[in-house]
Image: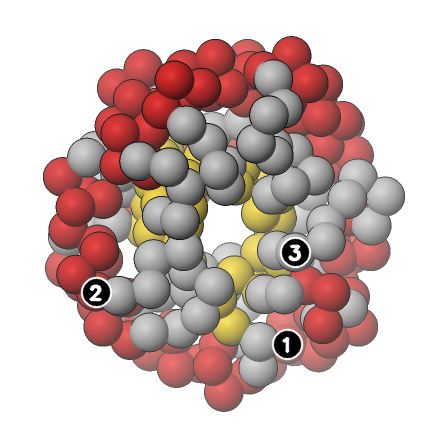
């Protein structure tokens, strides 16, 4: 299965990306297990985490049913090592056209961060798989609805930043396809059992309201 087909299937199963900023390689397997057993299938380890490529490799090997990759990918030369570690997902807080192009060249899923319609259309033109709307605190549901009205209808739109089980419904009603979840799910020092409980809370908040 290609990374893009796996992404589509994973998003349909659970439209949530786990952002494991600060994860250590020794935590990768237990935290990954907590997510997988809760139904999550999309996992990113930001590159400003301790030894992120080791964590990505451990997650990709242990959980082939998940699409694993890196977040905070800021430069095109960072894409290749993620791919070599087994990652097939590249996420960024910004839109860097060369990052997108390198990910496309390697057959990876790429979700650049955008804030405006201009950035959104430029990212799609470069080959982005979908759009990370970041920071979502600056993009309320009304703004998502306005963007959705002008974007190609098949565009995957994922708000990230400040998302909680309590505010997801408004974004979904406005046209979001899913979310990236960071510190509300995982933070350094939070054990796998606590991550599992939070993962299930987010799943429950999504149930019955996900756009298809």
- How far apart are labels 2 and 1 at the CA level? 27 Å
Q: Residue at image x 82%, y 56%?
A: 170
The reply to whether residue 212 is visible in this rendering is no
The one nearer the camera, 131 or 190, is 190
Q: Tell me the crowding category of disc 2: few under 14, some 14 to 19, or many 20 or more residues within 10 angstroms, Cα based.
A: some
Q: Tell me the crowding category of disc 1: few under 14, some 14 to 19, or many 20 or more residues within 10 angstroms, Cα based.
A: some
| Residue 164 to residue 138: above or below | above
Name the image quarter holding residue 153.
Answer: bottom right
Q: Residue at image x 39%, y 82%?
A: 122
Q: Name the mark nearer the viewer: 2 or 1.
A: 2
Dot 2 corresponds to which residue?
76
| Residue 198 to residue 15: above or below | above
Q: Position of residue 11 (x, y in %)?
A: 51, 40
SS class, disc 2? helix
Dot 1 corresponds to which residue?
147
Which numbered disc flags the more N-terminal residue, 3 or 2?
Answer: 2
Residue lying farthest right?
Answer: 166
* Position of residue 158 in the picture relative to residue 1 (left or right): right
Q: Position of residue 210 (x, y in %)?
A: 69, 42
- How far apart are labels 1 and 3 at the CA level? 17 Å
SS class, disc 3? loop
Which numbered disc flags the more N-terminal residue, 2 or 1?
Answer: 2
- How far apart are labels 3 and 2 at the CA level? 24 Å
Q: Residue at image x 64%, y 76%?
A: 147
Q: In the rendered view, how is the structure colored?
A: secondary structure
- Please identify the quadrant where the N terminus is shown: top left
Dot 3 corresponds to which residue?
161
């Amino acid at each position: 299965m290609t990374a893009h087909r796996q992404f589509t299937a994973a998003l349909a199963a659970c439209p949530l990306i786990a952002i494991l900023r600060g994860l250590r390689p020794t935590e990768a397997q237990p935290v990954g297990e907590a997510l997988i057993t809760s139904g999550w299938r999309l996992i990113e380890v930001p590159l400003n985490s301790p030894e992120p490529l080791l964590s990505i490799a451990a997650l990709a090997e242990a959980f082939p049913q998940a699409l694993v990759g890196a977040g905070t990918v800021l430069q095109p030369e960072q894409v290749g090592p993620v791919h070599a570690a087994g990652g097939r997902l590249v996420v960024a807080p910004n839109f860097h056209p060369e990052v997108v192009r390198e990910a496309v060249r390697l057959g990876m899923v790429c979700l650049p961060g955008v804030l405006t319609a201009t950035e959104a259309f430029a990212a799609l033109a470069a080959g982005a798989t979908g759009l990370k709307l970041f920071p979502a605190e600056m993009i309320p549901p009304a703004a998502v609805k306005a963007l959705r009205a002008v974007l190609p209808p098949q565009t995957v739109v994922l708000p990230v930043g400040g998302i909680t089980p309590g505010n997801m419904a408004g974004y979904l009603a406005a046209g979001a396809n899913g979310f990236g979840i960071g510190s509300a799910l995982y933070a350094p020092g939070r054990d796998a059992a606590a991550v599992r409980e939070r993962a299930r809370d987010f799943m429950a908040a999504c149930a019955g309201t996900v756009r298809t």
